[in-house]
């Protein structure tokens, strides 16, 4: 099954400094049929104005992945971690027993991010944070694993969940495939461009909820950047 969730139908809000769209129920947006997708709980599409962002606030027992699409985000937390994550790269925060952090756009341009929350396999573990660059060339033409809870994905940022996040950039006419084991689900969003996935046309910003599809065949109708999360 492939369920298309058009960008125009997503929830969201305008806060002046923040233009946000919610693929699942979040904050003041409530959709009883969109409370999550397996272990995936949040997928927010955020556009953050220059010199603004999310001031310090707490989390606990959640795996939070930030995929930067444009510009950069600067992280600081109460553990002493700090770092700048630029477009095409990801950061992972395992909130564990509790962490307070800020995510600010200190750049002179707008930043665009996907903010993705995944339920952890185990609660009450120490919090941690990490980031890693993934050169655009590595993502060209095929899916590359950026964050993963599986030991086999040795080059990915580790998360504490039965899940993985992959991304790919495809030129017009290029195609790639992704396999899903029985019982697994996926949620896919093109960050840019337009793709066809198993015959369904998907445009930038649209969400695609997938299950009972053992093989995904993705064809780029335009130059496209694609992000997919696989979960139990």
Image (cartoon, grey):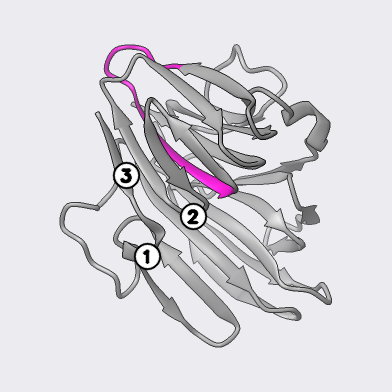
Percent across and percent down for residue 99 are: 56, 58
Residue that numbered label 2 is attached to: 205
Which residue is found at the position 16% from the left and 58% from the top? 32
Q: CA distance from mark 2 to mark 1?
A: 9 Å
Percent across and percent down for residue 19 are: 52, 75
Quadrant assignment, res 136? top right
Q: Residues within 10 Å of mark 2 (few under 14, many from 20)?
A: many
Numbered disc 1: secondary structure: helix
Left or right: where 47 falls relative to 74: left
Q: How many numbered callouts?
A: 3
Numbered disc 3: secondary structure: strand
Q: Is residue 125 above or below residue 93?
A: above
Quadrant assignment, res 230? top left
Residue that numbered label 3 is attached to: 4
First of labels 2, 1 by sequence position = 1
Judging depth in this view, the residue of 172 and 134 nearest the camera is: 172
Percent across and percent down for residue 53 are: 64, 75
Q: Is residue 176 above or below residue 206?
A: above
Image quadrant containing the N terminus: top left
Magenta-colored segment: predominant secondary structure: strand
Q: Which mark is residue 8?
A: 1
Q: Which mark is residue 35?
A: none
Q: Is residue 76 above or below residue 176?
A: below
Judging depth in this view, the residue of 104 and 136 nearest the camera is: 136
Numbered disc 2: secondary structure: loop
Q: CA distance from mark 3 to mark 1?
A: 12 Å
Q: CA distance from mark 2 to mark 3?
A: 11 Å
């Amino acid at each position: 099954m492939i369920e298309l969730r058009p960008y125009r139908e997503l929830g969201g809000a305008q806060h002046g400094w923040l233009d946000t769209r919610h693929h699942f129920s979040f904050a003041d947006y409530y959709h009883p049929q969109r409370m999550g997708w397996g272990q995936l709980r949040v997928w927010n599409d955020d556009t953050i104005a220059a010199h603004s962002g999310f001031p310090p606030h707490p989390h606990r027992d959640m795996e939070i992945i930030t995929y930067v699409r444009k510009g950069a985000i600067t992280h600081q937390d109460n553990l002493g971690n700090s770092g700048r994550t630029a477009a095409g790269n990801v950061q992972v925060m395992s909130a564990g027993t509790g962490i307070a952090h800020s995510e600010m756009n200190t750049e002179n341009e707008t930043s665009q991010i996907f903010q993705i929350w995944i339920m952890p396999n185990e609660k009450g573990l120490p919090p941690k944070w990490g980031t890693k660059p993934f050169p655009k060339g590595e993502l060209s033409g095929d899916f590359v694993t950026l964050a993963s809870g599986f030991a086999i994905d040795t080059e990915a940022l580790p998360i504490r969940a039965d899940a993985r996040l992959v991304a790919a950039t495809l030129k017009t006419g290029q195609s790639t495939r992704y396999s899903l084991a029985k019982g697994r689900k996926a949620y896919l969003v093109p960050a840019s461009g337009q793709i066809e996935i198993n015959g369904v046309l998907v445009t930038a910003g649209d969400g695609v909820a997938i299950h009972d599809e053992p093989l995904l065949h993705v064809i780029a109708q335009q130059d496209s950047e694609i992000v997919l999360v696989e979960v139990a």
